[in-house]
Image: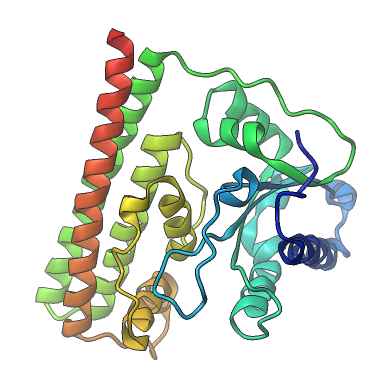
Amino acid sequence: MRTDIDHLPAAKQRELERIVEMLFDEFGQATENATGRRKGARILKIILFGSHARGDWVDAPMSANQYKSDYDILVIVSQKELTDRAAYWAKADERLIRAYTIEKTLRTPVNFIVHSLHEVNDGLAHGRVFFMEVAKDGIALYDADGRELATPKPKTPQQAAETAKEYFEEWMPSAAGFLDTSKYAMSRGRLKESAFQLHQATERLYGCLLLTLTFYTPYNHNIAFLRSLAEGHDRRVYGIWPETTHRERAMFQKLKEAYTKARYSKHYKISEDELTWLGACVEELGRVVHQVCTEKIDELEKAIRE
């Protein structure tokens, strides 16, 4: 795996060094009182993947209503228990978001996922495209021992087509079901419940696209993160959520917060007009995801016949 980031501007290289420092700092604080097996908690690798690793990132001005590539980072840890985001990585997530949105010490947003070495190697052994792309294009920003990842074992064309179709046929109807439930809840005046169901429809649609295209989606309910990953795989899903005005940007944030606040916070408020606006966006997302996924399945099935 490559270790150089010389293809990136000096400012981005410095940002990535700072990001690695923050990840280690917050992980160290999260594990400083660990006992038993967790006393040996370690970060084994930190890998930059996606557009910044490949060299095809888009760096639109922060004020422009244009696509802007995030830093995509995979953190590999020594034990599966350490992948628990709430227990070990929530503070790191908050710190990175704050550095970009409030402190402005980072000029590019950061998305990171965490897996154990066993999970990554298992993904490679089962031909999951996501992990294969990380192994192929990724750049190690930190590597504890230089140990290579497992050799990828790509799926056969038959296996790839069957797997993609299986994911699509499970996740697409599931997303439609959540959307239907959201509409019903709104019709009954249960607006907070409707918002939660709409969030779930959005999460399932992004999961459907990621699983159909890469056979992987992270265990994460953050639809902004899932959106970023999906937009990195097919630009047709970019622009689904209007962002011209502050109100439009705030609407997506309200949907993002619905996963927790719509269920547990008495202060969460959403109107029928807002739900209708968001619902139209989710329906358009569903249309595009359906198109992207069916095209991918057709492509995989064509490969079987060739």
Tell me where residue 126 sits by quadrant: top right
- The residue located at (53%, 23%) in the rendering is 127
Indicate left or right for 182 with 155 as reference: left
Indicate left or right for 198 with 4 as reference: left
- The residue located at (85%, 59%) in the rendering is 34
Check the image and report above or below for 228 versus 280.
above
Q: Image quadrant for the C terminus? A: top left
Q: Image quadrant for the N terminus? A: top right
Indicate left or right for 22 with 35 as reference: left
- Mark yes or no: residue 59 visible: yes
- The residue located at (44%, 73%) in the rendering is 260
- The residue located at (49%, 64%) in the rendering is 68
Q: Position of residue 225 (x, y in %)?
A: 49, 60
Q: Position of residue 170 (x, y in %)?
A: 28, 37
Tell me where residue 101 sits by quadrant: bottom right
Q: Position of residue 46 (x, y in %)?
A: 75, 48
Indicate left or right for 200 with 104 as reference: left
Task: Out of 150 and 197, give the one closest to the viewer.
Answer: 150
Check the image and report above or below for 244 versus 136.
below
Task: Out of 222 and 64, give the one closest to the viewer.
Answer: 64
Q: Position of residue 161 (x, y in %)?
A: 34, 21
**Which residue appears farthest toward the left when viewing the image?**
187
Tell me where residue 92 sits by quadrant: bottom right
- Mark yes or no: residue 169 visible: no
**Which residue appears farthest toward the top when viewing the image?**
306
